[in-house]
Image (cartoon, helix red, strand yellow):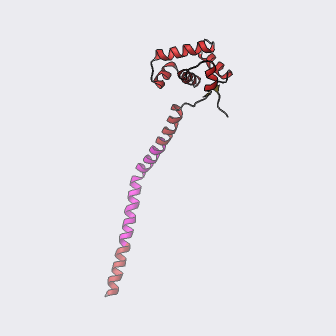
């Protein structure tokens, strides 16, 4: 009698395992579309974040040598503005970045032009590089 109970228990256990496996396969088959959609959504999210960071991030192209700038009597703020000019920021972007008004930035740029004896921002950046005030990146 113990043997029949044991045999009945083993058969019932195997039957339950088989039924669970069949139910699992059915669930996976039914949820396959949702799983693929979830994986694709995660991949696109990762790609979007990486591309977004590359699009938004601006590379700093120059370092500023403040000792050479002191010879031209450039203030710290004018050096900051010069560095941002060299990185390609517009006047409004510089004003937003430094938390000052647009007129203040225009004044700083005007003083930079006078001290560097130039009339355009590209000339100012080139002259600052020529005078070794702006140091281009290596590589």
Observer-nearest of 59 and 80? 80
Residue ID at (57%, 23%):
79
Q: Which residues are magenta?
A: 15-44
Residue at 37 percent across and 62 percent down: it is 23
How far across and how far down the image is residue 45, in percent? 46, 41
Give the farthest residue toward the bottom: 1
Instruction: Reply yes or no: does residue 19 show up in magenta.
Output: yes
Marks counted in the figure total 0
In the rendering, at what x and y percent does residue 71 appear? 64, 20
Q: Which residue is pictured at 62% across the width and 15% down the height?
A: 116
Task: Characterize the magenta stretch by its predominant secondary structure.
Answer: helix
In this rendered view, identify the residue nearer to me: 70 or 113: 70
Q: Position of residue 128 (x, y in %)?
A: 64, 21
Looking at the rendering, which quadrant does residue 121 occupy? top right
Question: Which residue sits at x=67%, y=24%?
Answer: 132
Q: Quadrant of the C terminus?
A: top right
The N terminus, quarter of image: bottom left
Please tell me which residue lies in front, 89 or 130.
Answer: 130
Looking at the image, is 123 positioned above or below residue 18? above
Residue 17 placement, left or right of 128: left
* Above or below 76: residue 46: below
Corner quadrant of residue 8: bottom left
Looking at the image, residue 42 lies above or below residue 89:
below
Residue 1 relative to residue 50: left or right: left
Q: Nearer the viewer, residue 66 or 64?
A: 66
Percent coordinates x, y for residue 83 in the rendering: 57, 24
């Amino acid at each position: 009698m113990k043997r029949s109970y044991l045999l009945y228990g083993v058969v019932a256990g195997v039957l339950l395992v088989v039924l669970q496996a069949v139910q699992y396969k059915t669930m996976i088959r039914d949820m396959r579309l949702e799983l693929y959609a979830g994986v694709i959504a995660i991949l696109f999210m990762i790609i979007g974040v990486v591309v977004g960071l590359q699009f938004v991030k601006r590379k700093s192209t120059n370092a500023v040598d403040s000792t050479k700038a002191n010879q031209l009597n450039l203030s710290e703020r004018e050096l900051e503005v010069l560095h941002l000019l060299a990185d390609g920021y517009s006047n409004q972007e510089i004003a937003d970045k430094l938390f000052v008004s647009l007129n203040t930035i225009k004044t700083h740029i005007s003083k930079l032009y006078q001290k560097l004896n130039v009339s355009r921002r590209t000339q100012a950046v080139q002259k600052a590089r020529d005078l070794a005030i702006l140091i281009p990146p290596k590589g």
